[in-house]
Image (spheres, helix red, strand yellow):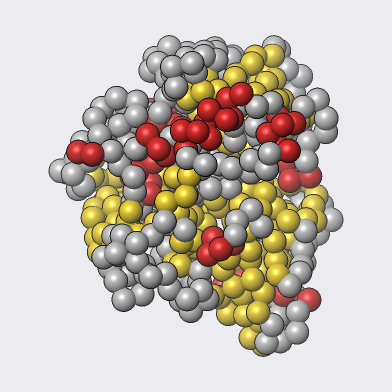
Amino acid sequence: MSAVTRRMFLGVLGGTALAAAGCAEISGELLRSRLALPRPFTVPLPIPEVARPVRPGRYEVTQRAARIEIIPGTTTEVLGYGGTFPGPTFDLRRGSRVTVAVRNELSVPTSTHLHGGVTPPGSDGYPTDLVAPGGGAKDYDYPLEQRAATLWYHDHRMDFTAPQVWRGLAGMALVRDDEEDALPLPRGERELPLMICDRAFEEDGSFRYPSPPGGGHTGHMAAVDGDYMEGVEGDVILVNGAPWPVAEVTATRYRLRLLNASNARRYRLRLAPGGRFTQIGSDSGLLAAPVAHDELPISPGERYDVVVDFSAYPVGSAVTLVNTLADGPARNVMRFVVARRAADDTAVPAVLSRPPGRVAPVTTRRFDFRRSAEGVWAINGHPYRPGVPLARPRLGTAEVWRLSSDFHHPVHVHLAHFLVLARNGRAPAASDAGWKDTVDVRPYEVVDVLARFDGYRGRYMLHCHNLEHEDMAMMADFEVI
């Protein structure tokens, strides 16, 4: 079914008919690579380097183009923080106010967003707050007055977020605190940040992306060809920038910090030939108590902090992380090989943290994510209007935000963290546990979240984190007053 036909199809079907038609899991259009794909599980899992401050409290990173080997035997030009893909991991501590100076030596403007960060509005990565190409620079101020959590950072340029993230402008940031340090969780080499994303490649190894002829223009549909309005999915799964990598592990517990950094692809992760994830954290920090899962759905922008006990497998076992939402090459994500036994003094305690409690909401607002009659992805019927807030919540209050959709829309709220209260009036899923900043709103679904507005007054955003939808105007401002 073509992209245009499918969108028309989605527009006329209700939720029940949509599921019955077998289209409920569609979240993008597949873009196939033009080169021979490598054999899975032959490339070692890389671990991104940890960023080092140039002096206490200050980091400097340069966005630049570089050629690196992603597909064995070829090179790919990436746009990278530090010229790497992913960018360096920032390992930070709660309350240790830092400044990250970003210098842009690319040929395109950029705007860096710390996804999940509680940041002043001037450092939030507003899409028109651009760092000029050819040597422009900006200091991003991160007070880090927030709980330990797995965050990430990525480009947020107006109309061009999708192709610029696709080409490499993304990395992870970890916030730690004393509460987390007191837990006997796996750490060091047994704590693995895993940035999962999909890409497609040209025959020469370069990234393939469906830009319109001439590279587009400055309008809302500048970045992507019209046949890919649903979102772009690639056929190569990368973890930390490597295709279907393999990691050697000991028969002990490992902490996996899972991030879906794909433009549009959703995953339902399972361990094969079997096994369980013990979830200890969500987007915005540790859970109060661990939650066990046989599988984990993860939409673009979401993170799960989980522990896997590899002592449950015989030495020599191959344990594959698979995506049950895909067939073919995209079904595999990565593989762990249990190489040997080792001592393990870690544990997952029954009590993990004391997360913030619920606050009584002062109002309820509705935000409807839907393709407009004009064919634009919109919120409450409006394409993005910079500087026109759809809400003005008060600092220190909480509100119920009712999110509804016509398609898969992973909704991300800047600044505010939230609890998922209900899906279609029923209890949320077990995988919705904890304080979050991104939630997958599925076709013809209504999701209620309790959002807390702490931190700063000023202009922030909510938007769909399907990056093609974001670039095609599915964003809105809100102002904290």
Question: Going 29% across and 71% down the picture, which residue do you hit?
Answer: 74
Q: Is residue 12 above or below residue 109?
A: above
- The residue at the far left in this view is 134
Q: Nearer the viewer, residue 37 or 149?
A: 37
- Can residue 473 be seen by looking at this rendering? yes
The quadrant holding residue 305 is: bottom right
List x then y, in percent, for residue 162.
Answer: 39, 41
Q: Is residue 321 above or below residue 42?
A: above
Q: Residue at x 40, y 16 (%)?
A: 385
- Towards the viewer: 181 or 258: 258
Q: Quadrant of residue 362?
A: top right
How far across and how far down the image is residue 379, in percent?
52, 19
Rendered residue at 59%/30% (across/down): 10
The residue lying toward the viewer, choosing from 117 and 231, is 231
Nearer the observer, 89 or 322 = 322
Task: Say left or right for 249 vs 20.
Answer: left
Residue plotted at (61% across, 23% down): 12
Image spot of residue 163 (x, y percent): 34, 44
Taking the image as shown, residue 237 lies to the left or right of residue 304, namely: left
Q: Quadrant of residue 139?
A: top left
Can you see residue 97? no
Left or right, residue 280 beside residue 188: right
